[in-house]
Image: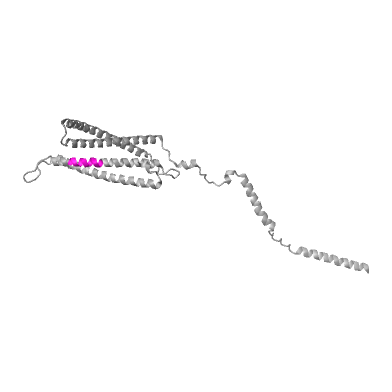
Amino acid sequence: MRGLLYQLTSSLALTLVVGLSTTATQQPAAKPKPPRLTTDDVVRTPVTETAAQSKEAATKPESATKPDVAESKPEQAKATEVKVSAEETSWRERVAKAQSRAKELERAAEEAELRITQLRNELGTSGQTARYRNDTIAELGQAGQRLAEVKAQARAAADDAAQLVDYGRQKGFTEAEGPKASSEEGKPNEEYYRSQFLKLTEALESAQRRVTLYDNRIRDLNQQLATNSGGKDKNGRATGGDSFFGMQLQKDREEAQQKLDEARTAQTKAQNDLYALREEARRAGVPPGLFR
């Protein structure tokens, strides 16, 4: 009886084990769970990237890590200054000398003409001794010859200066600039005001001299026109006279009048410019004794 129970129990256990095994093989495999990011995963990523970047930066040269910013040095600030060639420098010196010589000769010619006018006026003064008149006539002749020579030299010098300027223009040269009104530190440059004062003073003196010159020339031409017109007939009309010479005198007088007007305009401008320069210097703090 016990043996039969033992066999039934064993058979039942075996049947249960086989059934469970069959059921397990027939069920589908369980799907893998999706991975989840943990706190460690989130923290490690930037740390890894930072470490990689630090390693890459360490392998680069020092100049690559610095921003590309140009340093401002005093030497670089002057790099923009235009260098003048030796040929242009020589040209500037020649132009300055040629223009200065042309001005000197022009002034000498004007002064010679003024002296001639003065000598003529002295000859017309009564009460002079014969010796004085003879000396005056001799000096007048010399002054006339001197005037002709200086005028020719002045024209030649002016032509030379003009040719030099034209040559420089073709080569792209520029004349040298004068001193600036203020220094690099922002202080008034006395050399600038001194040079401007001398320049304007020369312009004023030249204008005043030409005003007197052309005024005398017009007076002389008017006298020649009156002499050339000749006498008058019984009806009061002018008789005779060289009409061609009279037309030339008239033309010369018109030109002299135009030059006189220009000289007066230049005189007024020079006076105003001198006044403006003094005011500018005063506001800049330049000592007034500089213009004495």
Horizontal and vertical percent position of residue 267? 28, 44
Dominant SS in magenta? helix
| The quadrant where residue 34 appears | bottom right
| The quadrant where residue 171 appears | top left
Q: Of all residues shown, which one is farthest toward the bottom?
A: 1
The residue located at (59%, 44%) in the rendering is 62
| Relative depth, front residue between 90 and 138 | 138
Residue 174 placement, left or right of 132: right
| Image quadrant containing the C terminus | top left
Q: Is residue 12 visible?
A: yes
In the rendered image, residue 34 lying in the magenta stretch gets the answer: no
In the rendered image, residue 219 lying in the magenta stretch gets the answer: yes
The residue located at (35%, 38%) in the rendering is 168
Horizontal and vertical percent position of residue 70? 52, 45
Q: Is residue 179 visible?
A: no
| Relative depth, front residue between 178 and 123 | 123
Horizontal and vertical percent position of residue 277? 35, 45
Q: How is the image coloured?
A: one colour
Residue 66 placement, left or right of 36: left
Identify the magenta region.
210-221
The residue located at (36%, 35%) in the rendering is 93
Q: Of all residues shown, which one is farthest toward the right?
A: 1
The image shows a total of numbered marks equal to 0
The residue located at (80%, 65%) in the rendering is 20
Horizontal and vertical percent position of residue 195? 36, 40
| Image quadrant containing the N terminus | bottom right
